[in-house]
Image: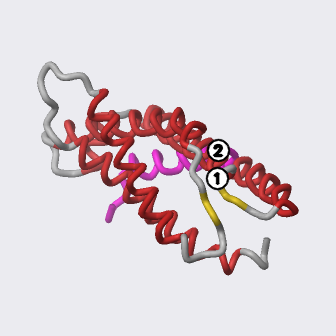
Amino acid sequence: MRLALPHLEPVLILNVAKEVEKDTAIILDAGLPATPGMDDEPRLTALLQVTKDIDRRFLDKVGRFPVEIVVRYDEIIPFRTRRIRLLHDAATRILGGQSQSSRLREALGAAYSPEDLARLLHELFRLYAEEVRSLSHSVRLPGPLVPLREMIARELLDVMLRVAWPLAQEIATRVFSRRSGD
């Protein structure tokens, strides 16, 4: 693992940027006015396609690296769809509260209690961890390295799930803290 990390670091950096781009697209969409009488499903379907397009651009960039990735959407769609819906709903709720307040923390406080925000974040983190686990099957490695991939994927999932709740609680606590200078 230590030998592989320096070679994978550029891929990991691109991956973080990819996830930020996806979440940004979802949050920006949540800020757009809703069409009265229209179901949100077409909007969420379009957002799912946006995330796939972002994935495709990421894979084009990753093509330069010694790792082949073939995304198996059949495995990740349930996790990603749920995550898009949760993030979109939360952003809509928070942005709706922001019209009454220009401060993000106040809008968060109007939309969520600390406990509810922690639960929301935990669920988003959990869904992302499950998506990452499913995506691990998309990384193509030579046969002898497949068991290593599976071991790394299991360990990564364990770590992500282990830190999800404490991290969600810490974020919620910091969001709702009233420290001076925040």
Q: Residue at x 34, y 37 (%)?
A: 90
The reply to whether dot 1 and dot 2 touch (C-beta < 8 Å) is yes
What percent of the width, then of the height, locates residue 174? 44, 52
**In the image, residue 17 lies at what x, y percent?**
44, 65
Q: From this viewpoint, is residue 117 visible? A: yes
Q: Is residue 126 magenta?
A: no
Q: Which colouring convention does the figure follow?
A: secondary structure
- Name the mark nearer the viewer: 1 or 2: 1
Q: What residue is rendered at 33% in x and 33% in y?
A: 89
Q: Is residue 171 magenta?
A: yes
Q: Read off the residue under disc 2.
A: 134
* Farthest top residue in view: 37
Q: CA distance from mark 1 to mark 2?
A: 8 Å
Magenta stretch bounds: 160-182
Q: How packed is label 2: few (under 14 Cα within 10 Å), some, or many (20 or more)?
A: many
Q: Is residue 43 above or below residue 65?
A: above
Judge the density around disc 1: few (<14), some (14-19), many (≥20) Cα neighbours within 10 Å: some
Quadrant for residue 46, please give it. top left
Q: Which residue is mark 1?
A: 138
User: Mark 1: which amino acid?
Assistant: Ser
The answer to whether residue 165 is visible is no
What is the three-letter code of the residue carrying label 2?
Answer: Ser
